[in-house]
Image: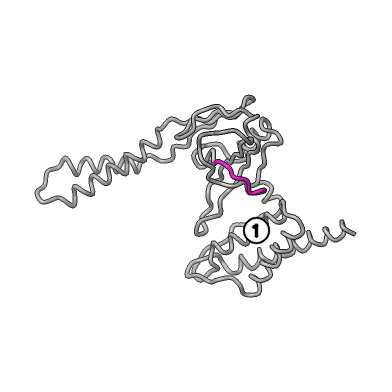
């Protein structure tokens, strides 16, 4: 499977370059500020265009991963890979981040790029191979290809979290709950349900109950308090139900 690069809209950077050139070409006395703005527009637009047309390749196949991007140009065979995980950073101010593909090399393997992430399940140092916002294929398509070729090495953390507890879209408005605080709380609950043990689920439920009792901060702009209260109630119930199952299994 060859992934296709998502170049996005190039209209704005092209306009920046053209406007900057036009400002420089049209003569005018005492136009230092205008010239500085023009140069800035050209540089900004040029950087975006250069990045859009930089060589890129990402292939998933029987031999491994074929990667061509800044800092990494090689075929990584499956024996060199100890684990692959499709993960997603926490939202930023309520805006979802694009998923990313992380790799944990087999012990002793040197990729030549530093570890800049951690495996969400076991915390091992990992390398970010791909930001899925850079490609046209959907996360589920990439997940299917990795499941086929990488086998047990691959973990779809996105799917595991959703299967454990689906977080609905939360409304954003004035005088809502602080977004980063809510996102961290929901993520901790999802992961406790998805791959945590009884202690993790108990700790996550305690945090949820503390938040429901008035521990969430209100911000000028944040998540709808009604939406958050409803989803925390559902998460609390899911964690409580899972804890009951643990007790039944133990007995």
Front residue of this view, candidates 234 and 251: 251
Residue ID at (32%, 42%):
45
Which quadrant of the figure has residue 11?
top left
Residue 102: x and y, percent? 58, 41
Query: Which of the image's four quarters has the N terminus?
Result: top right
Q: Secondary structure at mark 1?
A: helix
Identify the residue position indicated by label 1 in the image.
Answer: 188
Residue ID at (68%, 35%):
147
Q: Is residue 10 magenta?
A: no
Query: Which of the image's four quarters has the C terminus?
Result: bottom right
Front residue of this view, candidates 52 and 63: 63
Q: Colour scheme of this structure image?
A: one colour
Which quadrant of the figure has residue 154?
top right
Magenta stretch, residue numbers: 122-127
Residue ID at (63%, 46%):
124
Residue ID at (19%, 47%):
35
């Amino acid at each position: 499977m060859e992934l296709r690069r998502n170049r996005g809209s190039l209209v704005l950077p092209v306009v920046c370059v053209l406007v900057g050139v036009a400002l420089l070409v049209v003569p005018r006395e005492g136009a230092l500020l205008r010239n500085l703005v023009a140069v800035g527009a050209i540089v900004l637009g040029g950087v975006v265009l250069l990045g859009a047309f930089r060589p890129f390749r990402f292939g998933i196949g029987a031999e491994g991963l074929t990667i061509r991007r800044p800092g990494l140009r090689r075929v990584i065979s499956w024996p060199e890979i100890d684990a692959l995980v499709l993960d997603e950073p926490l939202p930023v101010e309520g805006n979802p981040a694009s998923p990313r593909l992380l790799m944990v090399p087999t012990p002793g393997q040197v990729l030549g790029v530093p570890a800049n992430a951690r495996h969400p399940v076991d915390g091992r140092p990992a390398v970010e191979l791909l930001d899925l916002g850079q490609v046209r294929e959907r996360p589920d398509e990439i997940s299917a290809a990795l499941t086929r070729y990488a086998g047990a090495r691959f973990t779809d953390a996105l799917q595991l979290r959703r299967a454990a507890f689906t977080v609905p879209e939360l409304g954003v408005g004035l005088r809502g709950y602080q977004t980063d605080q809510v996102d961290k709380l929901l993520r901790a609950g999802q992961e406790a349900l998805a791959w945590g043990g009884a202690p993790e689920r108990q700790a996550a439920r305690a945090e949820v109950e503390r938040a429901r009792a008035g521990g969430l901060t209100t911000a000028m702009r944040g998540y709808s308090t009604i939406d958050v209260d409803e989803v925390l109630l559902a998460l609390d119930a899911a964690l409580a139900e899972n804890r009951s199952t643990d007790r039944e299994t133990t007995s």
